[in-house]
Image (cartoon, rainbow, N blue to C red):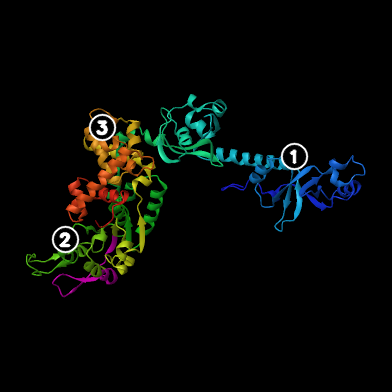
Amino acid sequence: MGRYHQFYPEARDLPSLPVQEVDGTISVREGQRLLESGLLGGLLLQKNDQYFIILHSDISSMGEETLGACAWRIALFIPEHCTVEELFKQWVKDPTAIPVINNRTDKSVAILDPLLVANKIFSEFTNLRGFLETVLCQVNESICGIDKGHRVVIWNPKAEQLYNVKAENILNERIEDYFSNLRVSSCMHERKEVKGHYHQPCDGAHVLINSAPVLVADNVVGGISVEKDITELVQLNQELNKASSQVKLLEQEIRKISGQDCAFRKLIGRSEAIQNLTIFAKKISFTDATVLLRGESGTGKELLARAIHQNSPRHLNPFIVVNCGAIPGNLFESELFGYESGAFTGADRKGKPGMFELANGGTLFLDEVGEMPIDMQAKLLRVLQESTYYRVGGSQPVQVNVRVLAATHRNLEDMINRRQFREDLYYRLNVVSLEIPPLRDRKEDIPELVHLFMQEFCHKYDKTIKKIEPAVMTSFLDYTWPGNVRELKNAVERLVVLTDGDIIDEASLPENLRRNTYISLVTSTVSQGKLMNVAIEAEKQLILKTLQQVKGNRSEAARVLGIPRSTLYYKLRQLGIPAKV
């Protein structure tokens, strides 16, 4: 029995024959009578502190001797729950021995007949092979398996289709005779697993590969790779560029006719995570439920919030965005709720409506809500509960009908424990929670995003890009994208702007991508060389020193270091730098 299958039984499930323990002094004739009854497979006899099994063939031609003179087959005692693997490990030490099954009370109850056991094991092997053949034929991924000698032992129909190589031609041949730069062989020799790695095994084929060594009792006996074909996504043809402007015009006409923007179509991605997110977001868009959008910076929280609004019954009314991280604390209340004439020095004589009033009938999007001052959180909670508030300096309540969407990249639960965020407000905002996955967790979406951004910027800058070199796509897929989709879009724009010809090659890549993602190397378990350790430590010390200079202000530290704030947060987590320095 294996970890994920039920093949190969325990010893008690193997074909067996009853056994009876007898005294060595009884006669051969009596032993023949017992065995000829057909009820027993053998007799168990103790002789000189050693147990033996006597079969019918052992005494069929004997005379009047006692059974003790016929005992020569050693009994191999095994518990009934013994696995087949454990049984054969013991049996191989003395192939002439006869296995005897002991029950839970340690009583000998049966013997195993070698021929019947062999038939049972062969039957299990045949069933297992049948299941394996069916799995290989039914999966949508290419599967290749090699032995220790690099000879191909598994090649399924999807592999035949992807590489145009028949199984009858490649099986039992060295895989290097057909392909180079192989992940499956390197994983086998290095005893490591690879998951979701972009690979180009041959010209014209692009795959995401899962590969691992095949281990039996901690010994490597081969390697196996499972490859998902993404060639169609990588090799998007030139017609997409020609049709892009026409599609945009058509979308604009549809918006004018329907009054609604098909905003969910802007959530690009065929990954399961994005598809499920879109389905759930569409479902809640028709309600007035408060939604909390969670995800790292650059994942598209505002885009999703706008899509929910534009797909809701409120789509004809305003969608107002409030960046809670960009409003000074002393201006927060006046920005959200507005103020009356003369409310404070410098106030407009006519007064000013707040964001809630501007969003009346529509949707208010509170971006980075985790940055909201604690004293404002109580006032926000009151508005959410009662839909009324007072302007600064005002005495008349203002009634509003506003749907609130909020977003954050911070861990609000930890902030609650540190008394930086109100627990009651958290539960009021977290009626429905949507988690937007980071780009590194949905790499299968990267090729489609790259080509769509390329079309957009080719149209914007009046350029024609016919091809992206596979090495460029490899770098995109291997990079961890701490800035997520926003960083990817900026990278594509840079490539389009700086490329002179009609092909984007590796020379156009920024330094961080050409180096195959420095952040990936920092977090990689295989990057353990002394030089890399020095580089990691140097980066860590630089960040720590900068944080000390700016007294822990992370926004200022990011500016001094010349990196986005999201990248700084990502490095702090990966390098294990504490929240307070």
Placement of 321 over or under 63, stated as above or below: below
Mark 3 / mark 1, whichever is N-terminal: 1
Q: Secondary structure at mark 2?
A: loop
Query: In the image as oriented, which residue stretches furthest toward the top?
Result: 177
Comparing labels 1 and 2, the label whose residue is closer to the camera: 1
What x and y, as percent, mark residue 79?
69, 52
Label 3: which secondary element = helix
Residue occupied by mark 1: 96
Q: CA distance from mark 1 to mark 2?
A: 88 Å
Q: Find out whether the residues at labels 3 and 1 contact each other: C-beta distance under 8 Å.
A: no
In the image, residue 171 lies in the stretch drawn in magenta: no
Queried whether the magenta region covers residue 394, the answer comes back as yes
**Stretch of the chain drawn in magenta:** 381-405
**CA distance for labels 3 and 1:** 72 Å
Q: Is residue 275 among the parts visible in the rendering?
A: yes
The one of 440 and 520 positioned closer to us in this rendering: 520
Q: Position of residue 467 (x, y in %)?
A: 32, 30
Residue wearing tag 2: 328
The furthest residue to the front: 48
Indicate the position of residue 277 as horizontal and vertical percent values: 38, 52
Residue plotted at (73% across, 50% down) = 101
User: Which residue is more in the foreground, 215 or 129?
Assistant: 215
Q: Quadrant of the C terminus?
A: bottom left
- Residue shown at 84% from the left, 41% from the top: 58
Contact (Cβ within 8 Å) of mark 2 with mark 3: no
Left or right of 153 on screen, residue 79: right
